[in-house]
Image (cartoon, rainbow, N blue to C red):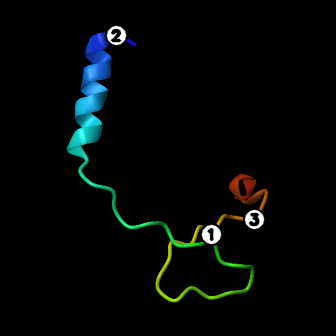
């Protein structure tokens, strides 16, 4: 990585500002979150080939 790249990366990270909130702990299977969370619902295997 060139010195110019290193400086650009440094300035980018500094521009992000202070750290945000800590990520919540993982939930055990079957537990319901106390607030909305992102849910990734994947299609069943082979669904892309159907149709």
Residue positioned 24% across, 40% down in the render: 14
Lateral position of residue 50 relative to residue 18, left or right: right
Lateral position of residue 44 relative to residue 3, left or right: right
For the residue carrying disc 3, how many other residues have a C-alpha within 10 Å: few (<14), some (14-19), or many (20+)? few
Identify whether 6 is placed above or below 3: below
Residue positioned 59% across, 67% down in the render: 40
- Name the quadrant containing residue 43: bottom right
Pointer 1 residue: 41
Residue positioned 51% across, 72% down in the render: 38
Front: mark 1 or 3? 1
Where residue 19 appears, x then y in whole percent? 33, 56
Where residue 3 appears, x then y in whole percent? 30, 12
* Disc 2 + disc 1, Cβ < 8 Å: no
Residue 51: mark in rendering: none
Lateral position of residue 50 relative to residue 11, left or right: right
Pointer 3 residue: 44
Q: Nearer the viewer, residue 9 or 46?
A: 9
Pointer 2 residue: 2
Quadrant for the C terminus in the image: bottom right
Whole-number angstrom distance, CA of label 1 to CA of label 3: 9 Å
Identify whether 44 is placed above or below 27: above
For the residue carrying disc 2, how many other residues have a C-alpha within 10 Å: few (<14), some (14-19), or many (20+)? few
């Amino acid at each position: 990585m060139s010195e110019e790249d290193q400086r650009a990366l440094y300035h980018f990270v500094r521009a992000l500002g202070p750290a945000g909130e800590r990520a919540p702990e993982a939930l055990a299977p079957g537990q319901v979150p106390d607030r909305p969370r992102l849910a990734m619902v994947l299609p069943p295997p082979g669904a892309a080939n159907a149709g």
